[in-house]
Structures are given as C-alpha cells and as structure tokens.
Amino acid sequence: MMKKTLKRKIPKLIGLLLTIFSFIIIFTPILVIIVLSVNASTKGYSWEGFTLKWYVELFQNDVMKEPIINTLVIAFSSTIIATVLGTIFAIGINALEKKKRVQMMVINNVPVVNPDIVTGISLMIVFSLLSFTLGYYTVLIAHVFFSIPYVVLSVMPRLKKLDPNLYEAGLDLGCSRISGIFRVIIPNISTGILSGALMAFTMSIDDFIITYFTSGAEYMNVSTWLYATLSRGRSFTPAAYAYNIIIFAVTIAIILFVNLKRDRKEKTV
Amino acid sequence: MGKKLIIMSHVSKRFGDQLVLDDFNLYINENEFITLLGPSGCGKTTCLRILGGFETCDEGTIEFDGKIINDLEPNQREINTCFQKYALFPHLNVFDNIAFGLKIKKLDKETIHERVMNILTMVKLTGYENRAVSTLSGGQQQRVAIARALINRPKVLLLDEPLAALDLKLRQEMQYELKEMQRELGITFIYVTHDQEEALTMSDTIVVMNQGKILQIGTPEDIYNEPNSRFVANFIGESNILSGVMKDDYLVEFCGHEFECVDKGFKKNERVDVIIRPEDFDFVPPSKGKIVGTVDSLIFRGVHYEINIMIAGVEYTIHTTKYRKIGDRVGLSVEPNNIHIIKHIDHA
Amino acid sequence: MRRLRPYSLPYLLWMGVFILIPTLILIVLGFSNLQLYNLGVFEITLVNFTIFIQDQVVSALWNSLVYSIITTVICFIIGYPVAYYLSTLSDKKRKILLAMMIVPLWSNMLLRIIAWEKLFMPTSIISDLFGISFDLLGTPTGVLIGMVAMYLPFMVFPIFSVLEKMDYKLIEAAKDLGASDLQTFVKVTFPLSSGGVISGVIMTMLPAMTSFVLPARIGLGKINLIGNIIESKFMKEVLGSSGASINQGALISLLLMVLSVISFVLITRVDKEGETLI
C-alpha cells in the first residue's frame, strides 16, 4: 500500500515542482521590471534606493509621451475595429456549411501560426505595393489584421454553442436580418466578444515585431521606441519600467473586473 | 373546413445535388391541423422552413391567402414557428422571450404585459414570468416556445417536432393540449413529426412523405385504413403485406385461398399487394379458418399480445388480447373490409 | 443562419490581400531582381540564392535550428508535466494558476528581454544585493533561458486546453480494462493530447526560431538567428549599396513560410478549426 501511494505521489510532486519552477522563470523578468521601476539607479546595474520618481517622470518626460499616446491610440482604435469586424466575420463563418467553415478557419489561423516576422514583412510588402506611407494608418491596419483572427477564435466557440434556430426564431418573431443579429446573436456571444476584444487589446499594446515592420521611421509605439533607444543607446529612461508596470496593473485590473462581473452574472442566472 | 389558406405548387428544393423536395404540391385549409409525416430526411422540415421563410425554394410558388409569398422575409409573414428544441433565447427570461415579438412591433408596455400574462395563463405558466428559461423543464420550455409564437396571433403556426424531446407521458399530455389549443384559437397548425402515433392522434389531415415526395394525403382514418402503398402501410402502424392476385372485382386470392374484399377496379388476375393490419385478424378454430398456422413466438405488449404465426413459410404478425401458446395450431379469419388492396410495385 | 453567410466573404478578400498577395510578391522577389520600390521590369534569376553560402547566413540558419529545437524540447519537458498538473487541480485553483501564467504576457516583450539583460549582466542588482553574479550575457545558456521563459506559456496553454477537455471517463475506462497508471498515460492520455502537443511545439518553435530582439540583446549580437538576418535585410541594409538585400530577405522569408505551411498542415490535421490556438 505504502509503495503504491508513493508511486502515485512522485509524478504529482514532479508536476508541482516543475510548475513552481515555471512560475519562477516566467515571473522573474516581471519582478526585475518592478524592482527597476522603483530603483533610483538610471542604468539599473545596482540598487540605489527606493524611489517613485520614474512614475512621476513618466508624466513629464516628453520623449516617451508620443510613443505612449501612439500605443494607446492604436490599441483602442484597432481593438474596436478588429472586434467589430471579427465578430461579423465569425458570424458569417459560423453560418457556412461545415466544409467551408473549416476552410475559412484554416485561413483565419494563418496569421496566428505564422511567425510575426513573416506577418510583418507581408504587411510591409502590401503597403509598399499600394504606396501607402508607413505611419499611423499602416500600423492601425496591421494591428487590425493580426487581431481579427483572435477575435474570431474567441467568438467562434460561443457561436457554435448557439442553437442555429435561434437567429431564425428572431426573424420569425419580427426581426430584420440586421436587428436579428443585434437582438439575438450578439447578446448570446457577448462574453466571447469581450474576451476577443481583451485579447486584441493586450496584443496590440505590447506588439513590437509587426509594428516595427509597418511603422516606418517616424511613427513609434512604446516597443519600437524602446528598440530604437536600446540599439542607439540613447535617452533610455527607467520611466519605461514605470509605464510597463502601470499598463500591466491596469490590464490585470480590467481583466479581474470583467471576470468577476461575469462570474457574478453567471451566478445570478 | 374553411378556404384554402396556403397553396404550394410545384415546389422543388435541392441542397447541393440532393433533391430534398421534388415537385411538391399541397394546399392547406384555414383552421386545419395538418401533419407532415415521414422518416427523417424526407423533406418535411425543409417544407416547413420554406413556409416559414427560412429557406427559399428553387422552383414553384407558395401562395398565402391569395398572395405569392416566395420572396417574403420571415418577419413579413403571418406565420410563426415553434422550433425543434424550442430555440428559446437564453439571454432573456420567460416574460421577455414571450414578449419578444410584441416588443419588436413596439406595442406599448401595458398591452405587452397584458397579452403576455394572458398567454401565460393559457399555457399554464402563470408565475413563471421572471424565471430564466434554462431553469425550466423540457415541458415548460415547450410551453414558452408555443406562447412566444402564438402571442403574435399568426394565422398559421408551424411546429417542427415540438414534442420529440419530451418523455412519453408528457408527450401524450401535450398532444392533447396542442389539439385543444388549435381548436380554441381556430388557426392553422402545420405539424412536422416522424411519430405516426402523434400524427394519427392530433391531425385533421396527414401528409405522408418520403424522399421529397408526397405519398398520400388524407384523414388519419383514410391513411390508416386505406394506405395507398407499401411504404405508407409500413410507416403508419404495423402491417402484414402479402402478395396476392386480383381474381375479380371484390375477390382476391392470397395464401392459396380466395377472399371477399371491398376493392375493385383492378385488371383480372393482376398481381396486387394485400395489406392486413395485425389487429384485424381474428382467431377461429383451425378447422374453420382458410389460413392455418402455428404460433411461432409471443410477446406480451401490455394492452395486447403480439403473436407471430408461421403460415406456409411466411410470418404473420397478429395483435390480439387472446392468449395462445407457442406451438398452438390456429386458424385465422379476416373481415372483407379489413383487407386492403394496393397496386403491386416491385421492390428491389 | 444561411442568410448570414455573406458576412464571411469580405474576410476572404481581406485575407487574400494580406496573405496571398504578399506571398506571391515574396516568391517573385526571391527568384528575381525585382525592386520593391520600382516595379518595372525584372528578370528571373537564382542569384539571390548566393546568400545561402554566406557564412553569416549559414550560421544563422544553423543557430535558429539548434536554439529553437533546444528551446522547444526544454519547454516540452517542463510544459507537459505542468499542463498535466494544472489539469488535475480543482476548478478554482486551475483558473487562478492559468490566469497567472497568462498575466506575464501582458508585460511588454522588449522590457521583459531588457529585464533578463539587466539580470544577466556581470554586475547587476542581484550581484549588488546578494553577491550572486549570473554573467550570462552573450552566452548560449543566457539566450536559452530567455527563450524558455518567453515561450514556455505557449507550450503549456494548448496542451492544457486539450487535457482539460479530455473525458476523464476514458482514463477510468483504461484503468478498468487493466492498464496501470503508466500504461494509461502512454496509451490513452498522451495520444489524446497529441493535438495540443503539436500546437504547443509549433507555437513555441516558430517564434523561437524567428526571434531577433532576444538573441540580439541577450546574445549581445554574437548569436544571430534567421530573424536577425531578415531584419537586417529588410530594415537595415535597404538603404545600403546593394539593392539585392530585399530579394535575399524575401528568399529567407520564403524558407520560413515553407516551415509555417508545414506546421499549418500538421495543426490542421489535429485541430481543424484552431481550437487549441488560444
């Protein structure tokens, strides 16, 4: 008996240890960023005492102001556009017969599986072919492009769970084609839409590679600004850590809030 | 029975290369309870969906109250549907589900409230208005679905296998209630089912379908007593189908004997199929019966025994309340009006 | 539902513009002397293939292969048990731990790399506070640690999502039929989770292979991967003298695309609609 329970416990113990190890290495950089964001040192080689000055500087430093605004503007606008389009496309794809639906999902997943660098170069080529000047609009299109598949992927399971007669019941009871979507489909897939939007937002706000290839020399978000700063070794400020921690905290807060609200809603139903 | 409300003429529909409805012709009267009956995949649901406006037909016309409605959207038709598995809106409670159609019509709040409360009484769900639909039992969901459709006061209610998900007892109860409802409201019910018993119990008219075609239209009695084909005979109730030869008008030969019957109009010596329902046989002493055989097996069915009898290598099924032992020799008789004769069709 | 189908059509057009067209252009670029900013005449040529004999490119290709494979193997060895362990936990614990694994991804990728860089310096906060110096900058170990930390969650998620959905009764059935714990795992659990494993391997390997900031920063530019070559061909050498850099970059990108396509075929075999991808 002893031996058997021990034999059972060993795999579980290994799982536990590896899980702990995973969390350590995944969280190490986050901890380092937190520490550096409150460290008085500019270079970050040594601990020079606790400070909040980088958080203050974040709102005063003009160098970072523009990339931050760009990042937020792109994140919000691309999230809204990608969520709307992705939801519409998902509704259309879900209505297709099975074979075509699978084909469309395969196409949908191309940007998800493709390495970002390939997506970035592809977009850059299209933009140069269309002679678009690289900047806000090209970055916006690029972010919408890579976000839509994630919106589709998170809306799809919800749509699949819907009784296909539901939309028709709406039409039967007097809805037009469009109002049927709003009155019947959207309320029932709203959690999927929301998680798609959150995913799009978090991907956009942290994107580096695709922005890098589609933004040109002038337009920068925080990531491309950081990259330029690092490679040219100029004007780096620990305020960047502070920015990251703030965005990080806000994201966690939003997602916690959404999840709590959803849990409560599901409980009351 | 009233005037013709719906006329479907030469309606055809294909999905890909599969012909689902094949030159379908049917008229439906006002206030009629009509049932489309057939095995799954026979096109009955498609027919209903075309009437509801969810599918368009490839050929033919659908006339409603004198107007052709082929191109009308579902929301422009005075027809409502009670969907398979109900399709209740999961995000709305009972009240809002039922009020859905009225809210779209933008009726005022008091009217909506009054009408919803009235219909809740009719479907016996008073007090359930604030419940989430997911907390209702199958039977209750069914009632909400009916209420949701009927509150819009349609001229026609389409019902797609509405009772399929309910257990036997509840199903029988609902059959009765649906029939009552239809009588009281005086509107047309078009009912789709694959359950022949349901069809026989509820319908004014039954349309038997197979492979996109109508095989027979008639009252339940007609369909049951005078099936016009092997398929109908087999699908509606159990049947003994024997091959025979028509000797003359009102005289048929099968099992090596001639029997009086009530059919005429066949050619002399034409090969025919003879259909006899299992409950239409009577036992007689072996010496007096034209058909004599041995009891092969016996199953107790509750109301009756189902007895299989071997007669000259052919197995006959008989439903009777009289008990016979396996191995008993029995004679069988059958009344002339219980012998149904149909044209013989070769089956592969 | 049928009438909602047209809503999927613009998506097909959109994907055509952003996937099909650039792929075709990349093919033309790779096999010709076409100039992207001068779409006039061009000649089909194989001259771009000469980059594959450049030492720098050969070593980058080799490095990409080695680093991505090692990273993937380590991620798998750690990630599978973790995913399995998580899937055995109670609903609540599972939710929290999974969320905790996603959370770090919301932190800027570049800053996470910078964090490793600062940590691996000969003199770092750690050496200042605790007297331990990692001094791993510019070493393969440093790059590998960075990669594993970066891509491990992408191995765990798909495997977890398959294991989580797996019908526990199947495991009970296997045991009922006489299989030991190990046999159950080898014959039932693992084969059933293979879809997640394939997704996980691909979602780890492709990004690792194409990363370019991480090797540049933590590897101090000493360890170049294929991504670094592509970056330099498309972003840095463009303004330089030889106009052929984009064509060469295109050729390397095509190589990556072939890998993507192979991955894609594998994924669609096991998971047609991409349910393990998020």
Image (cartoon, rainbow, N blue to C red):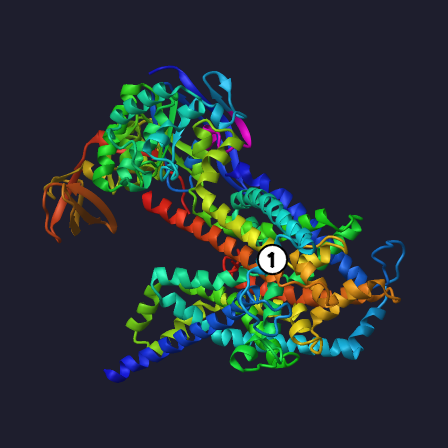
Q: As rendered, which of A60 and C155 lies closer to the eye?
A: A60
Q: Which residue is mark 1?
A: A206
Q: Looking at the image, can residue B230 be seen?
A: yes
Residue at the extreme bottom of the image, as rendered = A3
- In this rendering, is residue B300 above or below C154? above
Residue pictured at 46% horizontal, 47% vertical: A158
Secondary structure of the residue carrying numbered label 1: helix
Part of the protein shown in magenta: B49-61
Please provide percent x and percent y for residue B213. 44, 34
Please provide percent x and percent y for residue B107. 41, 20
Horizontally, is B58 left or right of C42 in the view? left
Please provide percent x and percent y for residue A192. 48, 48
- In this rendering, is residue A215 above or below B283? below
* B50 inside magenta stretch: yes
Residue pictured at 27% horizontal, 84% vertical: A3
Q: As rendered, which of A31 and C179 lies closer to the eye?
A: A31
- In this rendering, is residue C107 above or below B257? below
Q: Amino acid at mark 1?
A: Asp
The mark tally for this picture is 1
Q: As rendered, which of A81 and B274 lies closer to the eye?
A: A81
Please provide percent x and percent y for residue C110. 63, 64
Q: Quadrant of residue A166?
A: top left
